[in-house]
Amino acid sequence: MTTIHRLQDLARFPAPHHLAIGVFDGLHLGHQSVWAQAALHARESGGTAILVSFDPHPRSVLSPGNCPPILTHTNHKLRIASRLGIDAILVVPFDREFASRPGDSFVADLHRHSPDLAEICVGRDWQFGHNRSGNFARLEELGRQHGFVATGLEPLIIDGAPVSSTRIRELIGCGDLQGAKRLLGRDYSVLGTVVTGNQLGRTIGFPTANLAVENEQLPPEGVYAVMAALQEGKSLPGVANLGRRPTVSGSGESRLEVHLLDYPAADFYGEIMEVWFFRHLRREQKFEGLAELQAQIQRDVLEARRALRS
């Protein structure tokens, strides 16, 4: 997959260009339908389909004090895009200066750096430019002006409602992992950096990797059957505890810890790990001591194996 961050680099890709534009938080099935349309037309024209997204999430710039957790920060989005077979991505830096520009200016810049621009494909409710002043009708006008086709897709409907990042966040936040999976087309995952913990897990036979997750939506606290992967390596089964570890910690700070099954203890500090949540096993509990905690983790491991086999 080729990732670029400057509009000038669009010229690197074979023309004509078919752009799928949006924030694409989560790259859910609705987003994938927009991409699929651009990719289909690119195959028909012999050109290149290019996903165009923004970094960071616009809401974190425009409303930093009122920005909910997102589904995928940019590095995570790029991983998922690669697995979906997306091979060309333009990540546009988003800041207040960019947000203040008229939408017409952004589209004109796209056309200037991609003179063989054939199509811009978006969700029909997409808005762009300063104060979200541009809409699909305006994009169609700009297409006629600059000589490209504007393609707008209606929202994808699943279970009687439009697929949206907001809806998926709500499902994950209330623990409906299967509902989120139906809208994403895959199991939900988070991406984080392995950081130093207190290494208590090693002393009771269950070493864990402690993850610092970058403002991605987490499910409710509890114990989960998961799969995990370092970098783009093999996915490994595991048990994750998301919570405040009441048996051993009084800090009250929630954290995500992952114990990999059948994998030798190793130091992963500083490495990137992706964790897929498959099934909620139980709520977090406070035990009388480490022996009771250890016995429960053994039961969790058995239950996780059963869940992951199914």
Image (tube, rainbow, N blue to C red):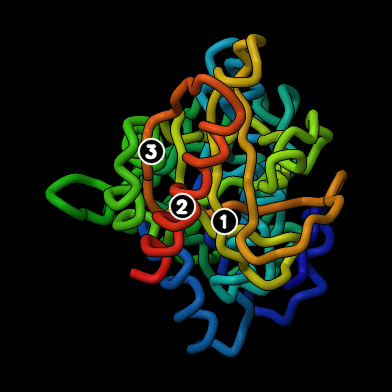
Q: Secondary structure at mark 1?
A: strand
Give amino acid for label 2.
Answer: Ala
> What residue appears at the point 37 percent right and 44 percent down from the top-left corner?
280
Name the spot of residue 156 as percent of width and height, x first. Answer: 26, 56
Q: Is residue 22 visible?
A: no
> What residue appears at the point 52 percent right and 87 percent down from the top-left corner?
43
CB-based contact (under 8 Å), mark 2 and mark 1: yes
The tally of labels here is: 3
- Between 164 and 47, the one nearer to me in the picture: 164
Name the spot of residue 161 as percent of width and height, x first. Answer: 18, 45
Q: State the residue lying farthest toward the left.
A: 160
C-alpha separation, residue under disc 3 versus residue under disc 2: 15 Å
Task: Point out the image quarter for the C terminus.
Answer: bottom left
Q: Secondary structure at mark 3?
A: helix
Mark 3 or mark 1, which has the lower sequence index?
Answer: 3
Q: Is residue 140 left or right of residue 45?
A: left
Give amino acid for label 1.
Answer: Gly
Mark 3 or mark 2, which has the lower sequence index?
Answer: 3
Dot 1 corresponds to which residue? 238
Q: State the residue lying farthest toward the front.
A: 291
Res 260 → quadrant: bottom right
Q: Which mark, residue 225?
A: 2
C-alpha separation, residue under disc 2 versus residue under disc 1: 6 Å
